[in-house]
Amino acid sequence: MTVNRMYVLLAPVIMPQCLAMTHENDGYIWHCRYGHLSFKGLITLAKRTMVKGLPLLKDTQELCSDCVVSKHHRDSIPKSSSWRASIKLELIHSDICGPINPSSNGGCRYFITFTDDYSIKTWTYPLKVKSSAFEVFKRFKALVEKESSHQIKCLRTDRGGEFTSSLFNDFCSEHGIKRQLATVTPKPVI
């Protein structure tokens, strides 16, 4: 340390170097700069002099790997289920929505829906916490089975923790309710 409280660093001096590179395909560089715009679009921009410094490019057959990957699509999801219920309560769809802000006057931030596949009738119950879904399902089951004199045969839900707990699965097994877990997809459960 020097007298005026400065540290002296002994570092080697790096001599500046000029590195240059040429790229044979200017079209590819401009294609990337403009968010993978098609070469036809780039040629239109150049011909109409809409971009300063954009040279007149020639169309190339070179494939951009990013564009090829982004054009791949997954298989489409069928518009309707291959199997539909033929009697009441044969198949029930259920899902939870939330958290919802602001909460309701009763302090509920979630709601759960149960939809009968046969009649398309939907029951909606407000929930304060997601963990109360099991208790609500038991109340729903008692209500609809008493009303319709049919038994719930199958319950289709997403893979949320509130539907996949051992307590929930054991209850369904005891009451002869088959479980179907929907595949992971951005489409709704129904």
Image: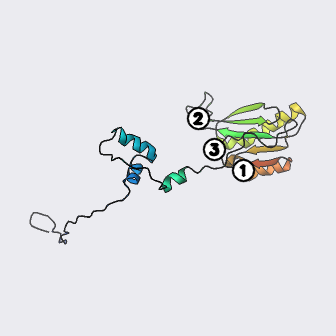
Closer to us: 155 or 100: 155
Kindly check if marks 1 and 2 are in contact, taking CB atoms under 8 A apart as contact: no
Identify the residue position indicated by label 2 in the image: 100
View extreme (left): residue = 3
Dot 3 falls on a residue whose secondary structure is loop
Q: Residue at the spot x=81%, y=38% of the render?
A: 141
For label 2, the crowd category at 10 Å Cα-Cα, with few meaning under 14, some 14 to 19 and many 20 or more, is: few
Which quarter of the figure has residue 84?
top right
Q: Residue at the spot x=82%, y=44% of the render?
A: 154
Q: Amino acid at mark 3?
A: Pro
**Separation (CA) of disc 1 from disc 3:** 19 Å
Kindly check if marks 2 and 3 are in contact, taking CB atoms under 8 A apart as contact: no
Dot 2 falls on a residue whose secondary structure is loop
Identify the residue position indicated by label 3 in the image: 186
Which quarter of the figure has residue 1?
bottom left
Closer to us: 48 or 177: 48
Identify the residue position indicated by label 1 in the image: 164
**Taking the image as drawn, is residue 159 in sight?**
yes
Comparing labels 2 and 3, the label whose residue is closer to the camera: 3
For label 3, the crowd category at 10 Å Cα-Cα, with few meaning under 14, some 14 to 19 and many 20 or more, is: few
